[in-house]
Every structure is written in C-alpha cells, then in structure tokens.
Amino acid sequence: MERPGTEAGARVPVRRPTHASTALVLSESFRMFDPRREVKHPVMFTVYVLFWFVALFTLFPQWFPDIARGYDPVYCVAITIILFLTLWFSHLSESIAEARGKAVADSLREIKTGVRARQVLPDGRVQWSSSDQLRVGDTFEITAGDTVPLDGDVVHGAAQIDESMMTGESEPVIRESGGDKTSVLGGTKVVQGTARVRVTAAQGQSFLDQLIRLVEGANRAKTPNELALDTILASLTISLLIVILTFMYLALAFPILSPSVVNLATMIALFVSLIPTTIGALLPAIGISGLNRVARANIIAKSGKAVEAAGDMDVLILDKTGTITVGNRLAVQFVPAPGVEGKELISWALIASSLDDTPEGRSILRLAARRGAQAPRLEPGKYRVVPFTGERRMSGVVLADGTEVFKGSITAMSVYCGSLPGPIVEAADAAARAGMTPLAIAANKKVVGLVFLKDVVKPGISDRIQELRTMGIRTIMCTGDNRLTAEAIATESGVDEYIAEAKPETKLELIRREKAQGRLVAMTGDGTNDAPALAQADVGLVMNSGTGAAKEAGNMVDLDNDPTKLIEVVSIGKQLLITRGSLTTFAITNDVAKYFAILPAMFVTAAGTSIGGVALLNILGFTSPKIAILATVFFNAIVIPMLIPLALGGVWFKPRSAIELLRRNLVIYGIGGLLSAFVGIWICYEALAWIGTQPWWTPAIQFLTQHMAGGIL
C-alpha cells in the first residue's frame, strides 16, 4: 500500500540501522563464532576447536584425568581468555570490512525503495505502477524530478540525468534516443526533459542490484591466490600440530620438564602462537577491502578473481581513442586534390557527412559551416546510406542518380579508387606523422581531397604508462588509424607497442597470442564486436554504455565509462597483492620471534633450570616461564587488531619493479615484524609481571583457586 501524498517517481525513505554502527559491528563479530562460519577459515577453525577444548578442560579437568598434568586453574583461565580474544579479534577484522560494504549497500538500497513508474501500455496509455512490476521489454516514461525505476535504453525523447549517486560525477549527462548514449541506470535522477525508456534489466539484475551485492560481499568466493595461501597455511598448521603432539607425548613419557609449565594448556598456547593466526585472521578482511576499493572506483567486479588477476597483469591492451587520447577527433583542415577547388571538396564532404551522426561526421559539418558552407538537404528516398564497418573502413551516400560519395581511410580509399594522386599521398603521410588522421573524400571513385582529423593525448597518460612499465607491465595500443598516425601517438604517449589499422578480430588474435606465451592480459571494450576478446582476456573492463553482449563477456563494468580506469584497476589489484604479501611476511617473521620467547620458557626442568643450550635463546631475559608463555600468546592475539587498519586500507606503494618491491617488503615488513614481536612480547611480559605484584591480584588468585580446584565451579 502506498503512503499518502507520495509523488510518482519519488523515493520513500526507510529508516534502517546502519551496518557501520559500533553495536552492529560488535554483534556481527560475535555471530561469527557460529561453527558454520568458522569452518570456512581452516587456520582460525583450528583455534576455534582448541578454544572450546581448553575451556572444557579448564572448567572440568576431572573429565580429562590422563592429561590433567600440572593443572593450574588461573593459568588455564588466562589461556582460555586469550584464545577467545584471538578468535574475536579475527572476527572483528572481517566484520569491520563487511560493515563498510553493507553501510554503502544500505544507502544504495534506499535509492530504489518506493519508486513508482509511469508505465506505457501497448495501446499507448500511461498508468502508474510499482517499479517492481516492470519486466524486460516494458516501456516507462520519465520526466523532470523522477527517479529512474530500472535500467533501460531511451527509445524516444531526451532527458538530462543526474548520475552522481551512482558514478560520483556531479555534472548531469544527456541520454537520448538514436545515438550511442541511450543507457539509463535505475536509481538516477531526472533533472529535465521527458523520455520513454525500454527496460533492459530484469528485477534484481540491474547495475544497482549488482553494486549492492558487490559491496555487501555476502557471497564472496575466495580467489585462486587466497585458496592457495589457505592451503599453505593449513599445511603449515597440520605440520606444527604433528610436532606439538609428538613433543607432548615425549614430555608425558619422559617427565624431565617441569609439569607446571609443560602441560596441555601450554602446548595449546605454543601451537596457537606458532601457527599463522595473524594472516589467517586478516586474510578475509584483505579480500573484502580489495573489492570495496574497486566499488569505490565505481567499478562492478563480477568476482574477486578479476581484481586479483589485475594485480598479476603482464600485458595491457589499450584503445587509442578515449583511453590514450581524448577521444573526439575533430576536423581541422580541408586539403583539395590537384585540380579541385576548395568549395567543391567541401561540397562533397558535406554530402558524405550530412547523414553521419558520429563525432567525426558532425565535426566535418561544423568545419564546413565555419568555411561558409551549408549541408545540402537530401530528400527521403533519393539516397542510400552506406554505413561504416570495420572491414570496409569507409562510409558514405549513394544518390538516386547513381552518384557515389564516400569518405574513409587512405588504405580503404586507395582500394576503392584504384590509386591516389601523389600529392594526396604525401599530404596524408605528413598529416599522419604529425599525429593527425587523414580521411580521403571520393566522388564516383575519384579522390577530391582530404579532411584532417586531430585528437590529442590525454594529459598525464605518458606518466601512467611509465608507471606500468616500471611495474613490468607491457602496454600495447590498438587503433584503426594508419601506421604513421599510430606511430606518432605511440611515440608521444610512450606505449611499448602499437598495432595500426586494427580490425575487430585483431584484439582477439593478440590476446590469444599473448596468453599462449603464459601472459595475463587486460583490455577494455564496449561493443558487441569486442565481446569475444573480452571473454578471452583475464581482465575485461566494459564501459557501462556498452552493449549487453560486451557486459556479459567482460568481468568488470565501469559505471563512469572511462577506459583509462583499466590502469586504476591494475593499481588496485597490485595493492591487494602487495598488502597480502606484506602482511604474510610480517606474520611469518613475527612467529619467528615468538620462538625466542616461548621455547626457553618450556624447556625448564622441575628444578627450574634450563635444558642444555636452550637458555641461549632467552635473549629477552625472561625469568618466569608461565608469564613468558602468557605474554607470547597475548601478543599473538593483540597484534591482529593492530594490523586491521593496514588490512582494510591497503599497504601504500609506489610503482616499482618486482625486485624493488620485494626488497622493500622484506626490509619494512620482514625486519619490522621481527623487531615488533620482540618489543611487543617484552611489553606484555612486563605488564603481566606488574599485574602480578598488585595487592588485588592475590585475592583474585585465591578466589579462582578455591572455586575451580578440581573443576568445581
């Protein structure tokens, strides 16, 4: 039932608690103690099982008479609490990462709540209906002030659309029928104009719905690198488990070591401290935050695998137009052929371009108008349009009297006309060397002159390409322009290779060739003819204004329609991989330092002396074995929340070679992990030792000992 006074197309606000609130983050972190969620993370699931086992052992030691050697209720309670904190901190990192996405998803979901639509019925009548009732193929009408109910294409009229809530672009865009800018997004706002739109997305499949699912990350599948790292961590965990069980068996069979130190609780503390709990706890948050960064860049990624592949990229295939150059080539000069007057050339150029709705065609009309010429009026039925195709590479008009007027590339027109005059070829070559694109104009298979089109390289693109080269990524520019124009743009932009006069199938052949050599390839596209290549590429970034076939074939969609985003996607992917690698390095060296704290504490005899040369490992000078063990396992827990900001925000990096990145990673996160563990464990040891000297500590110990002796609560 509709709310009274609700206007058509208006949004009905719905109050929801934000997922980013502290209360919901905390409650979600406790819900993650569900074993069905824990089992998805092998390392932390091991800690989860041991936590419950230690808790039972602490509360009911009489149930475990064979392994209750050296039972100390206070010590066991402390180990149980620290294991709980280890698990909870790991949940907290994941719940914060998910909460950020869910908060954005809630705001996006409110955009589409309560939207009504003016549905156009088959008989032409317009009636109000809920946006939920619209189906693919239905038509609805939008006017100023409306919220677009669902994705679709404008089939009649034009409207100015505010897409800022979807793309972040504050400037409204024009969407009109008959051109290449017909696509509208559900949830955007109509600023002015009236248009009719045909629905192209099924309920629940709009880009808004896809964006909500992406940022929520509810069904996020693990990427191949995550699965591989999980396998390594699980293998390491199993190996350490075997070592710990063997050690405990020997300790029980040959009771040389102190039973007050080497007991079940200590063995579990040792195991949890040495297995890779830090990276195991942070791994889900790193993956979720990587997808969130992609979403903040207004890109819909179909899976985390695509983001990860972008970080491993070897080759980037870039379109010249729109990616390397600004994209709108403009006519700047007419060059008549020998024996042809300038006015005659302009007249033929107007005929060839009067029905051409491309930016190039319109720019020719504007240049002719500045020269004082007007486009001729072509009567309906008195002409036949020959459209441009990738194979023909020319377009034009055939008039009723049989006159043929075409414009196209130099290569295509030389084939069409048989040959070109020498001065025309020389002028075309000079223009191409200057970075312009020459188009030949022909009437009845005779070249009457040239039109020069000029595009400019985007500011800063050469610096971005140099950054990619520094990271070891090869760039290849594909363009339909002739070789000389392509060479000029390639030289100015700094790409590694270029392919001139490329046809639609060129990209597909190039991708297959590169992949056959074991390289990962990324590309952008928006047309149906790009679909096969997008499907073959490891990363296929599709423009939101592209065709349905292209969007289906690619694995990322850019809502901003900016082909340059491909370079940004590579940076996000690199940051994701570097963050995971840096934190893994930090966690490993952190664990190495723990050996120097916990092993000397364990190899202590009943008389309180260290065995053999183990005392040499006690470089921190700890005197209390139990406090040393508690300090180590406590530091192992608190280091997780300390690294959460780094896992969520990503490791800062500057484009460098792989060797430089590895060296920096080892120095900062390798040595840093080792030193921070020594310092952190020492601080924890001193803090615990200080607590033990406080006057309130002795009564607390006595209370726990009295009430838990023998497992009686």
Image (tube, helix red, strand yellow):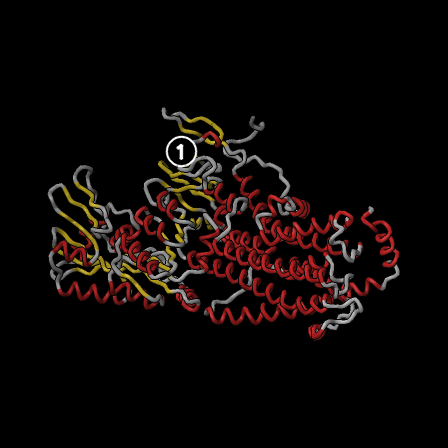
On the image, the x and y values in percent for residue 472 come to: 41, 67
Q: Is residue 712 left or right of residue 379?
A: right
Q: Residue at x 78, y 48 (%)?
A: 62
Is residue 370 depicted above or below 175 in this figure? below
Residue 704 visible in image: yes
Q: Amino acid at mark 1?
A: Val
On the image, the x and y values in percent for residue 158 come to: 38, 40
On the image, the x and y values in percent for residue 29 come to: 65, 47
From the viewer's side, name the closer residue of 702 and 419.
Answer: 702
- The image quadrant that residue 237 belongs to is bottom right
Q: Secondary structure at mark 1?
A: loop
Q: Residue at x 36, y 24 (%)?
A: 123
Residue 634 visible in image: no
From the viewer's side, name the closer residue of 515 and 197.
Answer: 515
Q: Residue at x 25, y 58 (%)?
A: 501
From the viewer's side, name the closer residue of 68 and 509.
Answer: 68
Disc 1: which residue: 136
Q: Is residue 242 left or right of residue 260?
A: left
Quarter that holds the N terminus? top right
Is residue 145 depicted above or below 541 in this figure? above
